[in-house]
Amino acid sequence: MVAIMSDNTSPHDRFRHVALSTGGTNATDKVGAIFSDALTRLETVIPPCREHSIVVTKLEEACFFAKRAIARFHEERTAPEIAPSLPVPSP
């Protein structure tokens, strides 16, 4: 697999820690709550089985990448606002 990166970044930059501001932390908390709510809803219709485990793994993976996107935008200081019209479950 070939990673597509801009010319001025190193693959090693992907492993750096990115400290988030309160806004970034709040955004990642909201993302976590959204994925947690999705899993709760899915667990009501998907029986415990191999496929259920795959669903959980893929949700974890998607959540990781969503949080990474927030961190990357935060790092570049161009973080988009989370749409207030989206219902966000309380943790």
Image: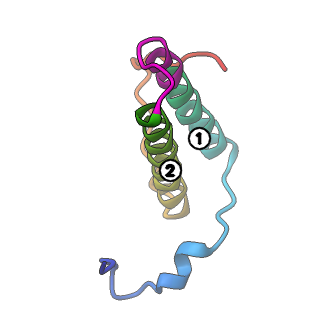
The image quadrant of residue 50 is: top left
Task: Characterize the local packing of mark 2: few (<14), some (14-19) or many (20 or more) Cα atoms within 10 angstroms.
Answer: many
Check the picture and name the quadrant holding the N terminus: bottom left
Q: Residue at x 53, y 74 (%)?
A: 14
Camera-side residue of 26 and 32:
32
Residue at label 2?
70
Percent from the top left, x then y, of residue 70? 50, 50
Query: Residue flagged by tag 1: what amino acid is it?
Result: Thr
The image quadrant of residue 85 is: top left
Q: Residue at x 46, y 54 (%)?
A: 69
Residue found at the very far front of the displayed protein: 49
Query: Residue flagged by tag 2: what amino acid is it?
Result: Ile
Whether the magenta-drawn stretch holds residue 63 is answered as: no
Residue at label 1?
28
**Considering only order in the chain, which callout, 1 or 2, is on the residue closer to the N terminus?**
1
Q: Residue at x 63, y 35 (%)?
A: 29
Q: Are marks 2 and 1 in contact (CB under 8 Å)?
A: yes
Camera-side residue of 56 and 53:
53
